[in-house]
Image: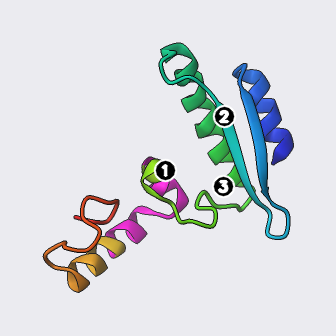
């Protein structure tokens, strides 16, 4: 995975620092970027897509130790499945029909 991240960094001419938790194989590739630079940020988005694809192809996950989070919500269906998302929404509606808990989040209604 680290080699893939380094290859992707070279491909998109980005600096990616990777740190993590060796005991559980949890990696945190961190891309140094300036969001004001639209061209660079586009390369960041392409790199992130590739990094996530590699992680999933190796049987990994995108969630790390903190869950999928709103920042990665657009990749949720790749991480799980459409059926899992539908089930999660149904469960949320059953438990919190007025969507009072965690409003506006991924499954928040």
Tag 3: Cα neighbours inside 10 Å, few (<14), some, or many (≥20)?
some
Residue in the picture at 80% in, 40% down: 4
Residue hosting label 3: 56
Q: Secondary structure at mark 2?
A: strand
Q: Earlier in the sequence, mark 3 or mark 2?
A: 2
Tag 1: Cα neighbours inside 10 Å, few (<14), some, or many (≥20)?
some
Q: Residue 86 occupies which quadrant of the picture?
A: bottom left
Q: Are marks 1 and 2 in contact (CB under 8 Å)?
A: no
Query: Horizontal placement of 55 versus 75: left or right?
Result: right
Q: How many numbered marks are there?
A: 3
Work out whether residue 27 or residue 60 is closer to the camera in this orientation and state it: 27
Residue segment shown in magenta: 74-87
Residue hosting label 1: 72
Q: Secondary structure at mark 3?
A: helix
**Distance of mark 1 from mark 3, alpha carbons?**
14 Å
Residue 83 sits inside the magenta stretch: yes
Residue 80: x and y in percent read 51, 64
């Amino acid at each position: 995975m680290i080699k893939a991240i380094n290859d992707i960094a070279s491909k998109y001419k980005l600096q990616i620092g990777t740190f993590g938790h060796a005991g559980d194989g949890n990696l945190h590739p961190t891309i140094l970027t300036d969001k004001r630079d639209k061209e660079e940020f586009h390369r960041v988005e392409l790199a992130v897509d590739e990094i996530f694809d590699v992680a999933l192809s190796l049987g990994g996950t995108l969630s790390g130790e903190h869950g999928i989070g709103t920042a990665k919500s657009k990749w949720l269906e790749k991480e799980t499945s459409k059926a899992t998302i539908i089930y999660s929404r149904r469960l949320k509606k059953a438990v919190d029909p007025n969507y009072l808990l965690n409003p506006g989040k991924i499954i928040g209604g």
